[in-house]
């Protein structure tokens, strides 16, 4: 199930990647069938959509239990990929799940996920500035701050990071769009009295779909350190309840660096692309909408905005402006519509089922509160 590299790759292979939905997407071949794949060491094994797995001749001969990033359990059918090719590198007999990637990447279609059982078998250089991904059995130049990690039995890459005096057992997860997430119930005290954004509702998607409702606090420009070294780029930290690990650090943070992964030595090297990056609150309408059971619902809202208190969580939306929500049948049509509204700095008229007067929303920066735990 873990598979192996067919033979060492002595000459560096470089392939382009696209940065769709703020994630690394590469082209690869499964049993000589070309496809588009998420590069994600957060997945223990690789994953394939059912239709692509059938085209690639994957035999499904077992069922595996997983816990996704939202700590939800699921049973997934599984089999083996006889040959997975990335550039000239061939990975033999590696395990794969059957996953529905539309659950977490509905607007950027992919055929599957290249998981940790493949990524951990070779060394990588991720050039976020030029959207290039290089791989080799040999080492790349060691530039930047070194981060030690270890590969757990489930293929996860784990390291120790420090934030606000908290020592965090942290998963390195290149499939996590965020910067850094920390388990609220265990580490809330380390953020007492700091300024935070508050979001109420569902804020995450993973392999099994939507996460659970939660109250999430976001802290900007937090300093991270590893051992005695302070990392040069601050992080945006989400403090939330529904997490599998004490902390996760994702591509939302790593995109600020050129990243070298020496899997054989279990070291990352982070070389900053730019000067210190400081985040500021993103303006928005203060809510998130999602299709649930054929209806469009409010799944998350700014918890600090008293104006939004009149919109109950999971309210059914019937119209956006004067247009019925049946005209936005997919997350992609909805995202495009809202992006246009935001780009044009236009208000959004929200019609809630059972409420006579529509709610007019304007794009603005989220309110901040002093966090109490």
Image (spheres, rainbow, N blue to C red):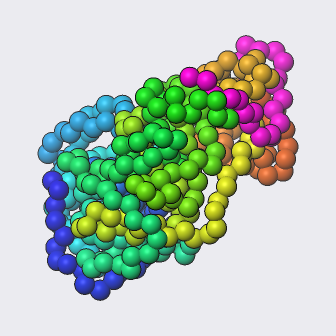
Q: Residue at x 14, y 45 (%)?
A: 61
Q: Residue at x 71, y 49 (%)?
A: 280
x and y, in percent, of residue 294 in the image: 55, 29
Q: Which residues are magenta?
A: 352-373
Q: Residue at x 73, y 13 (%)?
A: 354
Report if residue 330 lies within the magenta region: no
Report the residue that reaches farthest toward the bottom. 11
In the figure, is residue 149 to the left or right of 210? left
Specify the quadrant that holds the C terminus. Answer: top right
Can you say whether 365 is above or below 354 in the image? below
Report if residue 359 lies within the magenta region: yes
Q: Nearer the viewer, residue 195 or 59?
A: 195
Q: Is residue 83 visible?
A: yes
| Rendering quarter of residue 22 | bottom right
Q: Nearer the viewer, residue 108 or 219?
A: 219
| Rendering quarter of residue 69 | top left
In the figure, is residue 108 to the left or right of 168? right
Q: Main secondary structure of the magenta part?
A: loop
In the figure, is residue 200 to the left or right of 344? left
Q: Nearer the viewer, residue 274 or 153?
A: 274
x and y, in percent, of residue 164 in the image: 52, 41
x and y, in percent, of residue 19 in the image: 53, 63
Can you say whether 174 is above or below 334 in the image? below
x and y, in percent, of residue 81 in the image: 21, 59
Q: Residue at x 37, y 49 (%)?
A: 160
């Amino acid at each position: 199930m873990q598979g192996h590299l067919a033979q060492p790759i002595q000459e560096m292979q470089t392939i382009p990647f696209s940065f769709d939905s703020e994630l690394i997407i590469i082209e690869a071949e499964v049993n000589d069938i070309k496809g588009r794949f998420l590069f994600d060491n957060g997945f223990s094994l690789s994953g394939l959509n059912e239709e692509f797995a059938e085209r690639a001749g994957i035999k499904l001969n077992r069922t595996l239990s997983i816990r996704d990033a939202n700590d939800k359990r699921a049973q997934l059918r599984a089999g083996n990929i006889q040959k997975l090719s990335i550039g000239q590198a061939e990975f033999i007999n590696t395990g794969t799940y059957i996953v529905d990637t539309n659950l977490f990447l509905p607007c950027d279609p992919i055929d599957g996920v290249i998981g940790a059982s493949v990524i951990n078998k070779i060394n990588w250089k991720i050039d976020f500035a030029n959207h290039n991904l290089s791989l080799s059995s040999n080492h790349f130049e060691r530039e930047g701050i070194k981060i030690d990690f270890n590969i757990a039995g489930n293929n996860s890459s784990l390291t120790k990071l420090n934030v606000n005096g908290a020592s965090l057992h942290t998963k390195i997860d290149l499939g996590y769009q965020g910067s850094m997430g920390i388990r609220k119930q265990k580490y809330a005290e380390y953020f007492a009295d700091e300024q935070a954004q508050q979001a109420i509702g569902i804020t995450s998607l993973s392999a099994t779909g939507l996460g659970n409702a939660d109250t999430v606090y976001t802290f900007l420009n937090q300093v991270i350190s590893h051992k005695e070294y302070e990392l040069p780029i601050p992080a945006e930290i989400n403090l939330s309840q529904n997490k599998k690990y004490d902390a996760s650090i994702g591509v939302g943070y790593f995109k600020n660096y050129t990243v070298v992964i020496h899997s054989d030595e279990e070291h990352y090297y982070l070389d900053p692309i730019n000067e210190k990056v400081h985040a500021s609150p993103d303006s928005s309408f203060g809510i998130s909408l999602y299709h649930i059971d054929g209806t469009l619902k409010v799944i998350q809202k700014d918890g600090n905005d008293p104006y939004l208190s009149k919109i109950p969580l999971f309210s059914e939306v019937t119209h956006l402006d004067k247009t019925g929500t049946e005209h936005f049948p997919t997350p992609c049509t909805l995202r495009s519509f809202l992006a246009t509204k935001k780009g044009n700095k236009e208000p959004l008229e929200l019609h809630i089922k059972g409420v006579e007067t529509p709610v007019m929303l304007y794009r603005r920066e989220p309110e901040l509160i002093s966090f109490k735990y």
